Amino acid sequence: MDDKMRALIGMGVAFATGALSSFEEHVKNAKEHGAKAEELNDVLVISRAVKLTGSMEMDSFADGCINRSPKTQLKILTTSNAACDCGPEGCC
């Protein structure tokens, strides 16, 4: 993996986790290694989607935990039994 790709991935992870100083550093590194504005914006689009999806899933999970009967067991997720019901193999 080249340095530009490493910086772009770091940028996306930093955005999704809310690590401000890390995000700023990875953007700087990505630019220094030749990342164009379009590439930086593509990373933001993906990172925003990941962060939003994670927030929505956490909200739903938290509601379920609060409203779950004490006798109900937490469903263990596997790639063949995804929580999002996105298909037989799942994406989660």
Image (cartoon, helix red, strand yellow):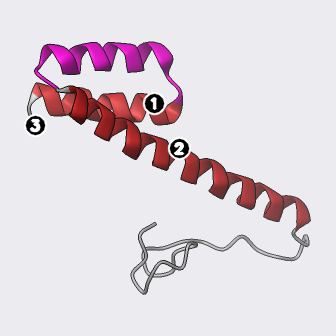
Distance from disc 2 to disc 3, alpha carbons, whole Å, reads: 24 Å
Instruction: Tell me if label 1 and label 2 are in contact, CB under 8 Å.
Output: yes
Point out which mark residue 51 bears.
2
Secondary structure at numbered mark 1: helix
Please report whichever mark, 3 or 1, sits nearer to the chain's N-terminal start.
3
Residues in magenta, as a range: 18-35
Secondary structure at numbered mark 3: loop
Secondary structure at numbered mark 2: helix
Label 1 Cα neighbours within 10 Å, binned few <14 / some 14-19 / many ≥20: many
Report the residue at 51% width, 33% height from top.
17
> Where does label 3 land, which residue?
1
Q: Nearer the viewer, mark 2 or mark 3?
A: 2
Please report whichever mark, 2 or 3, sits nearer to the chain's N-terminal start.
3
Name which quarter of the figure residue 11 lies in.
top left
Please say whether residue 72 is one of the residues in the magenta stretch. Answer: no
> Where does label 1 land, which residue?
15
Please say whether residue 31 is one of the residues in the magenta stretch. Answer: yes
